[in-house]
Image (cartoon, rainbow, N blue to C red):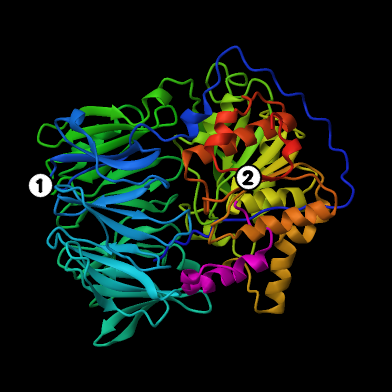
Amino acid sequence: MHKLLVLALVASCGGALPAPPPPPPPAPASAAAPIPRALLFGYPERDNVQLSPDGSMLSWIAEHGGTQNVFVAPVGALHQARVVTAETARPIRSYFWAYTSHHLVYRQDAGGNEDTHFYRVELATGQITDLTPYPRANARLEMMDPRSPTKLLVRLNDRDPRAHDVYALDLLTGERTLVVKNDHGFVAFASDNDLEVRLAAKKLADGTLQLLVPDGAAWRPFQTVPFEDAETTRTLHFAPGNRQVYLRDTRERDTAALIALDLATGQRQVLAEDPRADVLDVLSHPTTGAVQAVAFEYDRVRWRALDPEIAPDLAALAKLDGGEASVVSRATDDRTWLVLSRSEQHPRRYYLWDRPTRRARFLFSGHPELDRQPLRKMWPVEIQSRDGLTMVSYLTLPAAADPDGDGKSDAPVPLVLLVHGGPWARDSWGPIPQHQHLANRGYAVLAVNYRGSTGFGKRFQNAASLQWGRKMHDDLIDAVDWAVRTGITRKDQVCILGASYGGYAALAGLTLTPDVFRCAIDVVGPSNLLTLQASLPPHWSPLVATMRTRIGDPTTPEGRALLTAASPLTHVGNIKRPLLIGHGANDPRVKQAESEQIVAAMKQRGLPVTYVLFPDEGHGFRREENRTAFWAVAEAFLARHLGGTYQPITQAELAASTMQIREGRDGIPGL
């Protein structure tokens, strides 16, 4: 019902620093020009392309005024593109078309603090209006429908920072009307096609999920989703007629099936399922909302048609250009689709699909300069954990290790273990900048869907409960052992790198298994699981039950002991190897203090650590100048400790970013 992405975690150190095995010397720059960092981590030429509901206009995000803004152009005259937003500091990432086809709405915060507002753009006049001008509030879109083109359902927590109320928001006037006052700790809602809130979800103290339906002015319990299904069951949207709601549901099965739930009888009808993977996404009719196709992702995304009318369209799109094709927008008359094709070697290719003729017209590449670079293939692999779980993982090899491009390593090379955040998220096949950056610099890159990763059924996800720093970390060590066993790398040539939970995993790697990794890079990761839970943003309050049942309960002696034992800060004295930390000062999820306290503990013990801070970033780095500067530092750090090639950091890169080097400048070549 609600997909929680927690994101976080960091590392530790201690005592006199034992000498690690000598690192290989940094390799000289290769004869072939390396891929510029600005291409990999800078803004693409066009991103987040969308089709207007009436099918007449295209919109996209592109650079203007030093950051990313929204452009629009007629479908048949892209050369007439014009910018319609005026951001100068922080890039726009999220926007959508209103069903009027005359307005756009974008979502923006300040410096990564996640106090987000909705801004309306009136295309005819260029006027930009803050539709949610409420301080310290987090605005979220709940629902919109083509039959009510000037009405939005939104969620706002300005009344109580701990809970989001539901409002009907008038797109033209900005007037809002309270629909649901959330005094019950609801974590999610489901609204029907008439924009009526018909279902709410609440997390109970034991981790179960309670579904409730309105009963006059009150709410009546409707169904209870057991703890083991609570993170893998959630609503999608209502079916035509508003009698049924579509769900991803794992009750009475392992993987999440597409279910139609009848709100009158409680009966559930299975529409589609896969024995290896959860439902990833659905393709629905643009006006009726009827689900016409469903996507499953095990190693790659595959679509399955439920409506025979669109089966030939999907079959043709699957053969488009070898990438994973997805329909990102549909005109309301359903004659025109906007299609995105993505692969590891062609990051973004956009097509217009004409349904009457079933022909695709290539529009443009979102990143044409990157298409011309020597990007490496990404290979799905299956790795077995020590207790028998199958972990779908992704391997990218540098040219020196795999000159014939068959996915088999001809010689061992240094490896970077790239750990995804969440942890309730997953790694996927496709255009991942870090994979291409690191492989281009001479490293093998391995991304592992460790237990707790989403998409592989509830047993796999639930196997991570209370396993931070325990079996979840064992999975990463098992992946390293597999890479050594198969000749991809050598035992003493592995670095661990990650953001959010991946940052925690990097810190755990140095503190819980201090002899496994030659070095570690942590981005916005927590170092202390007790202080992490104590400092969550107020609007995460309804999810505290999930945190406690999945990670550990700090209100009980047993829970505190578990969290303390799994915290890298507890074991800082074990650190033997170099550490690089990056953080955003405005991060509301994993506060800056999480990095500060591990850095302070390392300094107290005389352990070397490099720590960089970005004062205008939050949970991750959005400005291209900051991303490029951080990965310049990371590249030099890895070259010193793993021996790959690196491009020296330029003064221009440093000057363009806001990066502050708080500690360990001498730990980075070229600074």
Q: CA distance from mark 1 to mark 2?
A: 52 Å
What is the secondary structure assignment of the residue under circle 2? Answer: strand
For image coordinates 23% across by 49% down, the residue present is 306
Q: What is the quadrant of the C terminus in the image?
A: top right
Q: Position of residue 514 (x, y in %)?
A: 79, 47
In the image: residue 587, left or right of residue 125:
right
Q: Main secondary structure of the magenta part?
A: helix
For image coordinates 63% across by 36% down, the residue present is 634
Q: Residues within 10 Å of mark 1 (few under 14, many from 20)?
A: few
> On the image, numbered disc 2 is attached to which residue?
660
Residue 543 visible in the displayed image = yes
Task: Give the quadrant of residue 479.
Answer: top right
- Seen from the viewer's position, the closer of residues 28 and 628 is 628
Q: Earlier in the sequence, mark 1 or mark 2?
A: 1
Residue at the extreme top: 31
Please say whether residue 396 is one of the residues in the magenta stretch: no
What is the secondary structure assignment of the residue under circle 1? Answer: loop
- Seen from the viewer's position, the closer of residues 654 and 55 is 654
User: Can you tell which of label 1 and label 2 is closer to the viewer?
Assistant: 2
* Relative height, residue 156 to residue 570 (above, below): below
> On the image, numbered disc 1 is attached to which residue?
333
- Seen from the viewer's position, the closer of residues 15 and 265 is 15
Three-letter amino acid code at the position of disc 2: Gln
* Relative height, residue 387 to residue 342 (above, below): below
In the image: residue 289, left or right of residue 575:
left
**Residue segment shown in magenta:** 524-549
